[in-house]
């Protein structure tokens, strides 16, 4: 269906006529004075001997250009057929730790040792692709927390921005409380019936202004549910000068706090020691009951204002070239 988005702009169409009627031009003002014969009075015939274009022809181009300009300002557009989009009624905010400890290579992915962030990206990307109908957002945090992707149905954008996340971009330490507070603030402003935070970290709260348990209490008060995922293997082989020893790379993981955050909001705590356990965790999260919502309909809109605007500009250029090429 074709329509003008701002149809009221057509009210300015008679504006040139009103200007001509109530704002006299220099030529009309000069008619009141004494005129002295001049060779310029013979401009009706050009130097080449060909007559000047009729007045109606000279006015046609400017009027047509004005008509096209007003049509472009009215924003013509084409509305496509309604497209149904299924929405689950769930808002998911992924909160991802990018502190320096995420560089530890204690995960095995396709027979290669990779850091924790790389393993998390590979599993979380599949999770995002499967969440059709959910609105998903992304909060990244380290020493500071910031919103990387606001809540959106565009899962491809969320997946791409997750893939571009870099360790240390938000600082070296871990501000879990600030990250939860930011995610809760963004979810609180939404009207979804089910709001969930999925917090992924490998450490303890070492920075920020908000204590994590206090942030969880505020989230619970707003009806938010927090699922926490503790990332890191239980043991790791480290080469030293005199051989190889086993170490626990997850000594900094504060499981008690992560478990308390989940319990406070009615969520669950998960422990991800390898890629397989990560996949099982996200499969469990996939089984969360969606809140049904009626299908929403959207109509694709294709703006067409560029065509009348281009026509008006072409006519203006043509008039300028005609005037420049006319002998005086």
Image (cartoon, rainbow, N blue to C red):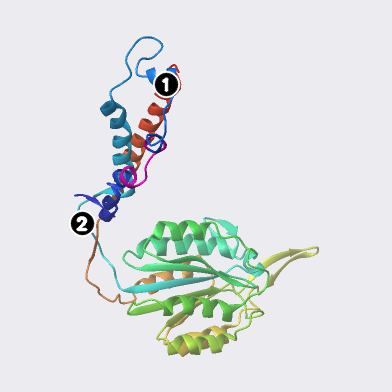
Per the rendered image, the range of residues in magenta is 19-28
Circle 2 residues within 10 Å: few <14, some 14–19, many ≥20:
few
Q: Is residue 64 left or right of residue 165?
A: left
Quadrant into which the C terminus falls = top left
Vertical placement of 24 versus 242: above or below? above
The one nearer the camera, 278 or 136, is 136
Tell which tag, 2 or 1, sits nearer the viewer: 1
The prevailing secondary structure element of the residues shown in magenta is: helix
Q: Is residue 22 magenta?
A: yes
Query: Mark on residue 147?
Result: none
Secondary structure of the residue carrying tag 1 is loop
The one nearer the camera, 149 or 276, is 149
| Residue 207 point in image, percent of width and height | 66, 79
Q: Is residue 260 left or right of residue 19?
A: right
Quadrant of residue 30 in the image?
A: top left
Residue at 44% x, 83% y: name it: 268
Residue at 30% x, 50% y: name it: 12
Vertical placement of 7 versus 88: above or below? above
Query: Mark on residue 82?
Result: 2
Residue at the spot of label 1: 37
| Residue 269 point in image, percent of width and height | 48, 81
Residue at 49% x, 60% y: name it: 122
Residue at 29% x, 43% y: name it: 17
> Can residue 5 be seen by looking at this rendering?
no
Rounded to the nearest angstrom, the CA distance separating label 2 from label 1 is: 69 Å
The one nearer the camera, 74 or 301, is 74
> Can residue 101 be seen by looking at this rendering?
yes
Q: Is residue 186 left or right of residue 171?
A: left
| Residue 155 point in image, percent of width and height | 39, 60
Answer with mark 2 or mark 1, whichever residue precedes in sequence: 1
């Amino acid at each position: 269906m074709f329509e003008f988005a701002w149809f009221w702009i057509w009210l300015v169409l008679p504006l040139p006529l009103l200007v001509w009627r109530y704002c006299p031009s220099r030529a009309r003002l000069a008619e009141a004075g004494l005129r002295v014969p001049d060779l310029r009075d013979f401009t009706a015939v050009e130097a080449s001997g060909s007559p000047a274009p009729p007045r109606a022809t000279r006015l046609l181009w400017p009027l047509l250009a004005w008509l096209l300009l007003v049509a472009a300002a009215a924003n013509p557009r084409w509305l496509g057929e309604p497209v149904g989009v299924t929405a689950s009624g769930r808002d998911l905010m992924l909160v991802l730790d990018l502190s320096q400890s995420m560089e530890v290579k204690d995960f095995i992915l396709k027979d290669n040792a990779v850091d924790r962030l790389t393993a998390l990206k590979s599993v979380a990307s599949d999770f995002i692709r499967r969440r059709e109908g959910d609105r998903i957002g992304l909060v990244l945090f380290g020493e500071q927390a910031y919103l990387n992707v606001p809540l959106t149905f565009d899962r491809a954008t969320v997946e791409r921005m997750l893939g571009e996340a870099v360790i240390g971009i938000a600082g070296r330490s871990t501000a879990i409380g600030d990250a939860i507070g930011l995610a809760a603030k963004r979810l609180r402003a939404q009207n979804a019936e089910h709001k969930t935070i999925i917090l992924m970290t490998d450490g303890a709260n070492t920075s920020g202004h908000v204590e994590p348990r206090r942030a969880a209490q505020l989230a619970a008060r707003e009806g938010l549910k927090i699922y926490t995922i503790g990332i890191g293997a239980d043991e790791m082989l480290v080469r030293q000068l005199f051989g190889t020893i086993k170490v626990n790379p997850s000594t900094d993981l504060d499981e008690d706090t992560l478990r308390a955050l989940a319990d406070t909001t009615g969520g669950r705590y998960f422990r991800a020691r390898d890629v397989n356990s990560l996949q099982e965790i996200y499969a469990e999260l996939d089984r969360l009951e969606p809140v049904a919502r009626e299908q929403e309909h959207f109509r694709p809109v294709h703006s067409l204002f560029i065509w009348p605007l281009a026509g008006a500009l072409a006519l203006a250029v043509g008039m300028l070239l005609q005037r420049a090429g006319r002998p005086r």
